[in-house]
Every structure is written in C-alpha cells, then in structure tokens.
Amino acid sequence: MPVLCSSCSEKRAVLKRPKTGHSLCKACFFWAFEEEVHQTIVAAKLFRPGETVGIAASGGKDSTVLAHVMKLLNERHGYGLELMLISVDEGITGYRDDSLETVKRNQQQYELPLKIVSYEELYGWTMDAIVKQVGLKNNCTFCGVFRRQALDRGAIMLKVDKICTGHNADDVAETVLMNILRGDIARLRRCTAISTASEGDGVVPRCKPLKYAYEKEIVLYAYFKKLDYFSTECIYSPNAYRGYARTFLKDLESIRPSSIMDIIHSGENLSVREGVKMPVQGTCSRCGYISSQALCKSCVLLEGLNRGLPKLGIGKHHRLHEKILSQQPLTEHEQRKLKSVDF
Amino acid sequence: MCSGSCNGEFRGSRNSEHLLCVQVLLAVSGGPSSCSMLSQVQEGVSQNAHKKLRFFPGIVYIDEGGALGQCKEMRQKTTSELCDMFRSTGFPFYILPLEQVLDLPGSVLTPSPPSDQPGSVYKAAVDLFLQSGDSSSDGKAEEQECVSLPAVQESHTRLLQQLIGSAQTLTAKQDLLNTFRQHLLVHTARTRGYSKLMQGDSCTRLAVKLLTSISLGRGAQLAQDTGFSDCRYGGVTVVRPMREYSAKEIAYYNHMFKVPSVVIPNLDTKMPDKASIQRLTQNFVTKLQADFHSTVSTIYRTGEKLQTAGRGSSAAEDAERCVLCVCGLDTAAEEASALQATLISEQLSQSSVKPEPPANVGQCCSSERPCGGAEGTGDCCRSSRDHEATDLRSLLCYSCRRTVRDMSSVDCLPQYVLSVAQRRQNRSAMKEQISEFLLDDADENN
C-alpha cells in the first residue's frame, strides 16, 4: 500500500521529511523547501531590491543548493537581486582544488559571475604550508579566521552589497553548543542572528538564508534535483573541537529530530545578565579590519606564522599586541612558549 | 580539603541573607549529592559549629517507585533505610509517594505571594529564634513525623503509571517525572510552612542540566533551571547550595566523612546511551570532561552569566506562565524565529492551500468560532482530541509543548493541570470577547 504525499494527497510519497516527519512527493518537497527559504528571506528582510549579493560558494552541498535556490527564488519572486559567486581557495591539495572545479561548473550552469580569492595571494600562506608549521590540532582556527577576511576582501573586489553563506540549521545548532562548551558568551549571543550588522569599512554584511533548513533536507534536495556538488570532508579537520559538538548533535537528532530547531530556539531566547563584560568592536591598528582587540586575529596569526611562532594567536596573547605592533622582538621565554607545538 | 573549609564554602555559597531564621526544606533523593547536603546542614546547625547556620531544616523524600514500576516490598525497604537515616539527624522529615501528585490542588501552579518580607519580619524572626533556645536535636524528637510509606492505593499507582506511560519517549517521561516531582516538593514546602526548598544539584549535574535544557528548547528558562535561586513558585524559593561542588568533590567528601547514601534507580538507569536526551547529554559531558578537564566548570560559568529572558520574571501574569513548568512562556512566534519556521514547515508539509504566515500563533480557535481551516496553527478541530491537545499547547512553553507532543493522550495529565488549563482558556476566551472594552490589564494580577 503506497503512502500518499501528505501535502497534495495525490502522488505517491518518495521521501520522509527529516524536519517534520511528513511523507512528501518530490514536487511538494521541492516546493516546501523553496517556500521555507523564501519565507525566511522575507520575514527577516534579508535583501532589498537592486542589491548585489555575493553567494559564498565552496562547491559543497550547502553552497550549491544555496546558489540554486537563490537563483530560482530571485526569478520566481522577483527579488531584483544581482547574484554572484565568491569562492575561497585555501590551498589544500586534493580537497580544495577539486571542489573549486565544482564551483566553476556551477558558474557555468547558473551563468553567474565568479571570483576566486586565495590565501596565497592574500596572506602568502596556503593551508598546506600552515599545517606543516602548526600541526593538526589548531589548524582550523587559522583557516576559519583567514577565510572570513578572504570572503570580505573578495566581496569588496566584486563590489557586492551583501554576502550570503550556506550555513544551515545544523551548523547554527552546533555553533550554539560549541559556544556553551567554550564559554564564549559574546559569540553565544550573536551566533543565532540570521544576519550580521553592517558597520565598518572593509566589512560586508552577511546573512544565512538556509538558517532553518536541516542538513539532511539540503542533501535530499540536492539528490532529487540531481545537483552537482563535491562531498568530501576537509582532510585537515578530523581533530577539530567542533567534531564533538557535531557528534552530539547527530545523536540528539537521532533521538528527537526536532532537537536541531529546539537548540536554535533556545539560542534565540538566551538572555545575558547585565554587567557581564562584553568585547567592544573597534578596528585593527595594522590592517583596519574590524577587531575587538588592538590587533585583529588574522594579523596576530600571520605574525605568528611569519616569525615561526605557531602558537601565537592560539590562547591568550593580548599582552603581546603592543610588542608586535611596534616590531619589538619577543623575549626568549615568550618565544619558547610560543614555538612548542604538539602534533 | 578539610571539613571546616568545606562547610565554610557551603555556608558562603548560600548567600546568607536568603536563609537566616527561616524554615528550609531539604529535598533529599537519597543520592550522594543530596545526602552530602544533608550532612553539611546537620553539621552546620549543630551546637558546636564554628559559624552556626541559623535556620530550621526539614527533610522531604519523594518515593518514585510507583512510576518506575517497583514492587511494594522494594519501596518499603528503601523507605525504611532512608527513614533510619533521617531519624538520626533529628530534623522533622516527610516521606511522600509520588502518587500524591495526582491529588494536588491547582494552586500549586500559581506563584503564591512571598509570605515573609525579609526586612520587616527579620527582627521578629531573630527574636523567635533566640527564644526557641537554639534548634535541633533535643526538642525535635516529638516533631518527627516518621511515617513509613503511607498506604498507597493500587488505583493511584496505576494512574501514575498510566500518566508516565502515556509519554512515548523516555525523554518525555523523564521530563514529566521531573516536573511532577517538583510540583509535589513545592506543594509540600508550602503546606508545611517552609519558605525555602534546598535541592542538592552538584556542579556536574547542573552542567548536564544546562546542556539538556538547551537541547530541549528551554533556553529562555535556563537561569531558573540552573541558577542558584529559582523564584518561579513565588512563596517558595528553590535554592541550590551544592552547585559549586563537582560530583567528584562530593564523592571525596562523602568518602572521607562517611556520609551514608542510598542507591535508588531512576527511569534511565541501565538504559542504553541514546535512550533519552538526558542520558545522552550526561554521557557526553562526562566523556568530554575526561578529555578536557575544564568542560564542566566552563559550562557552569556560562550558565551563571545568563538570566531569565524578559517576560519570564516573577512579575509575569498567570496567563503568561506555562501550565506545566510554571515558567514564563517563550512562544511568541516573532518574525524570523525558529518557532515560526517550524510552524511554517508543518503547514507546508500538510495542507494543499497556500498558507499565509501565521499571524497569531498562541491561540487556536475557541470552540465558539468556526475553525478557519488552514489558518492559525493549521491542525485545528479535526477531532475533539486534537482540539484539546492544541488548546493545551497554547498554554505551554516551547519545551513542554514538545513533551506533550510525545504523549499519546493529554487526558492522562493530573486533574489539577487540566482544570487550571481549562480555567485559563476560559479566561482567555472571555478576555478576547471583551478586549475592545478593556482599558488596561492592571487588575489581572489579583
């Protein structure tokens, strides 16, 4: 006895939605998924007509689906947006160069302009070289910090008004959990926001249209739509702390599928006590990027790499900012502490 | 870690103004943490304590054997072990079966006004205390109510089991059990004249509780669930003095000072790791703590920096409190929120009518107006059972809604919950009828 789609009640259901458990046919699922993203965009007022929007594309499933859906909704609902693809090349052999091929194919399929920025040209370091110096434990910190700036630089080169990223519900829920585990109250407050504030030069506001889409549904969508994407894990990521939060989240989802949305709901309703010290936004004294310290994180990390002190930037280092800014040499004791790396 | 400094920390952690010269009810579960708390209180109020604790403690134990399906003999055995332990302390104690929760009055869900204002009656309380010639051991013998487990009717036990059994998932079962246990504790404290309820949650347990609460959708109520004091019940304040001790420290203390405790099984005892969210979180935190030793304390410190979101404060009206957990409601589906997104998803997966984004999510149609079909929550009025379930949902906070969703029938809920729910729905319907004539809500708080 075939199960009928619970939405149209006519066609046979071909999938069960991870988010709500309903059985849907292909067409109704596509429509529901796209409509939900549309509702998110409209309710959160993410875009204005006439804006140029850069889609952060990595070639992975989230950004491929994002590009596809953004193009579709732009045409279907007449957002009036000009869309472009921005991609970041971290210089990871065997991973990023393959996924970039996918992005180039996407560019042709969707007929969107593409800009690729690389760590090599921006910072003079590829991730391969960084991992050789830093090891496999803290490398994700470098990559994440550099990528954020790289996206902004690419966006400015393309002169876009906004960036949209493919972060999905699972990512946001993981981030909430991670910030609690790390005790990062400042990020905890901000991480469930769907778009970032737009102050500061050198910073382009960014948003997450897929914020309420489950990762599994994104995969289902890409599968049934036969979208072309690159699906390998980054080769340097297995030891990241985020992995713990991710495993926990996956287990939670298996017990109660709605937990992902429940965590996001919790995150949105958190309220921080008054009097808790929060970082204040300023600018980096060296490169002018936004920063809550004298030097932005990527300048500190770069300094560490260039001086052969890989641990500079991991852990507390505010006291050394003045020294770095004024180009003073560090004492031997400090150097020794910062050099040791456990692989 | 000497006894003196331990006890000093214990006293310090209790924020002394809270607890001077008042009746304090200690909720003891028999486990190491609450027994440790009992032992420290005992030490503190004894005659020769260095800085004597000045309050009148009582002990309460809730026997949950009925919900776990334990046999009468087992329950009797556990109870008499605990009875002996409590008797040796000299404090008055009460042993209650969880079945009593079925007979609670509706007033337990309403925060009562605080009975003692700290400033004004403080002097009177101090005088009373001094006159009573110092508390504990001697005078209290005749006040001890050692009731071996009061006779529990079979039918009550069956009803309780039905109630817990109506929840399809272990997560929901545990959530319900915790809620009803808390109700019974608060009711006991109120009726016996205790203004404070002390619970023995350790730092480790609170860190697990924090993560569990986040996973269940209780972000808005975190501060009340895991903070030092919880004022949601009004007259009775729940305090957690053991929150600065980790489970390990408590274990060491108990070992060194030979504090007795009783092993009592729980709903998730011997269950597999992923049986419930509570169990999964506990395993996760414990394992992570083994690799990263600062996990528990970091989670705990994060929790300390949070507060109850806006409307959840003790000043919230009745109608804005959840009918199960008595916390402020967090279900105003604002634009671009997770709640709204979930509702939209449910609508899109079901009806074939193109939906409007729901305008007012909190209310289903009342029984007088005809149901608008795809409007509102979208699952109105298909059957009277659905109708009841939906109506109850509007009176629950986000996570209690999830729990009730896992129940096969809301009729199994105790009478006091259903009658309070009915009353609030009636008032809400009344208010809607006369809403255009109301000038302000000032008199709602009466």
Image (tube, coloured by chain):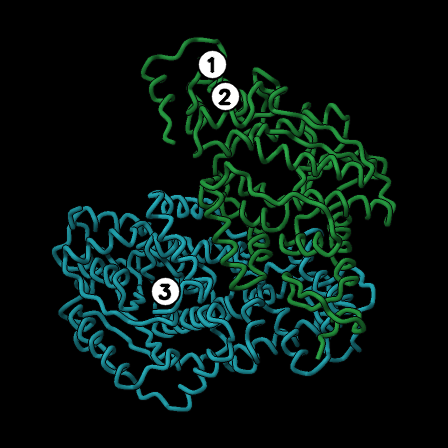
Chain colours: A green, B cyan
Q: Are marks 2 and 3 on the same chain?
A: no
Q: Identify which residue is drawn at 13% across, 69% down.
A: B138
Viewer-nearest residue: B109 or A101: A101
Of helix, strand and loop, which one carries label 2? helix
SS of the residue under disc 1: helix
Above or below for A94 versus B353: above
Q: Earlier in the sequence, mark 1 or mark 2?
A: 2
Residue contact between numbered discs 3 and 1, judged by CB atoms under 8 Å: no
Q: Position of residue B409 (x, y in %)?
A: 57, 80
Indicate the position of residue B401 as horizontal and vertical percent values.
Answer: 58, 67
- Residue that label 2 marks: A300
Classify 10 Å Cα crowding around label 2: few (below 14), some (14-19), many (20 and above).
many
Instruction: Give whichever of B438, A47 is nearer the camera.
Output: A47
Give the Cα distance between marks 3 and 1: 58 Å
Q: Residue at x 80, y 32 (%)?
A: A113
Q: Which residue is mark 3?
A: B195
Give the vertical position of B315 relative to A336 (above or below): below
Res. B62 image quadrant: bottom left
Look at mark 1 in the image and give the residue it sits on: A324
Q: Is residue B309 visible?
A: yes
Q: Amino acid at mark 3?
A: Ser
Residue under the image location 48 percent in, 39 percent down: A184
Q: CA distance from mark 2 to mark 3?
A: 55 Å
The percent coordinates of residue B420 (x first, y second) are 56, 76
Q: Residues within 10 Å of mark 3 (few under 14, many from 20)?
A: many
